[in-house]
Image (cartoon, rainbow, N blue to C red):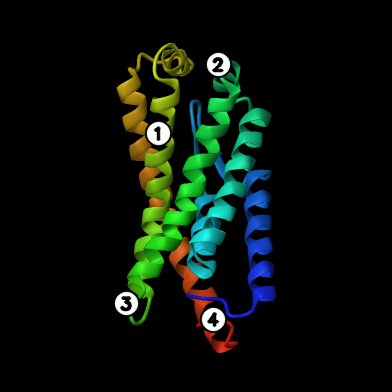
Amino acid sequence: MKVKNSTVRLTLLGVFAAIILLLTFTPLGYLNLPLFSITFLTIPVVVGAIVLGPFDGAVLGLVFGISSVIHGIITGQGALFLEANPLFYGVMCIVPRVLVGFLAGLIFKGLSKIDKHKFFSLAVVSLLGPLLNTVLFISALILLYNGTVLDAWVSLSGASLTLKDVLVTIVAVNGLWEAAAGLIVGTAISKAVYELGKRLKLVA
C-alpha cells in the first residue's frame, strides 16, 4: 500500500518509531529468558513496513536495532558480546533488523500485486517478519562470534547444553512464538490500519 500524503507518512513513521521505543523500555516488548529474549518489537517494524513501504520499514528496523543495543546494555544480556567486540555487537543487533524492515516491505509490495484483498499478503508478511528476524540474527551471531565467545555464552545457562542445543532452542522458541504473535497481532493491526487509510482516502 502507498500513503499518499507525505505529512501523514512522516507522522505514521514517528508513531511506529515511538511504539518501538515504548516497547523496548517497558516490560511489554521483551520476555527475558536466561540467554536470550523473545521480542515483540518486530510487530511495529513489520506493520510499518507494510503500511509505509520497504525504505521506511528499514528506518523502523534501524530504530529497533539501535534500541536493542541499548536494551542489551541496560539488561546486561549483551555484556559478553560487547566485551568481546562492541562493533560486532552493533552490527549483529542493527543490520538484521534493518533487513527485516526492508524485506517485509518488499515482500508485501510484491505479494499485494497479485492479492486483490491484501489479507493473504498481510498474513504472510506478518508471519515471515519475526522468522526473518530470528534467522538473520542467529546467522549474524554465528558469523561474528563463532568460537570461544559463543561457548562462554552457552555456559552462562548453567545447564549442560551444547551450542547446537541453544541455537535450536532459540529458533524453535523465539521463532515460533514471535511468528505466532506476528501472525495474529501484526495481521490484525496492519489490516485495521489499511482499512482505516482506505476509508480516509490516505492510501492507494
Mark found first going from the N terminus, 4 or 3: 3
Q: Name the residue under label 2.
A: 84
Q: In this view, does 31 lie to the left or right of 119?
A: right
Gap in angstroms between the C-alphas marked 1 and 4: 35 Å
Q: Amino acid under label 1? A: Ile
Residue plotted at (40% across, 40% down): 136
**Residue drawn at x 68%, y 43% as measured from the top left:** 25
Label 1, residues with CA under 10 Å away: few <14, some 14-19, many ≥20: some
Up the image or down, 108 lies above or below 180; here it is below
- In the picture, the disc for residue 115 is 3
Q: Is mark 1 on a helix, strand or loop?
A: helix
CA distance separating discs 2 and 1: 17 Å
**SS category of the residue bearing label 2:** helix
The foreground one among 116 and 41 is 116
What is the C-alpha distance between the residues marked 3 and 1? 31 Å
Q: Are marks 3 and 1 in contact (CB under 8 Å)?
A: no
Which amino acid type is shown beneath numbered disc 3?
A: Asp
- Of callouts 2 and 3, which one flags the residue occurring earlier in the amino acid sequence? 2
Q: Which residue carries the number 1 mark?
A: 138
Nearer to us of marks 1 and 4 is 4
Q: Which x, y percent locates residue 8?
A: 66, 75
Q: What residue type is labelled 4?
A: Val
Earlier residue among tags 4 and 2: 2
Residue pointed to by mark 4: 203
Which badge, 1 or 4, is on the more N-terminal residue?
Answer: 1
Where is 130 relative to 159, above or below?
A: below
Q: Picture coordinates of residue 32 (x, y %)?
A: 54, 35
Q: How far apart in space, not on screen, are marks 2 and 3 (Cα)?
A: 47 Å
The residue at the point 50 percent across, 26 percent down is: 34
Mark toward the start of the polypeptide (2 vs 1): 2
Residue type beneath disc 2: Ala
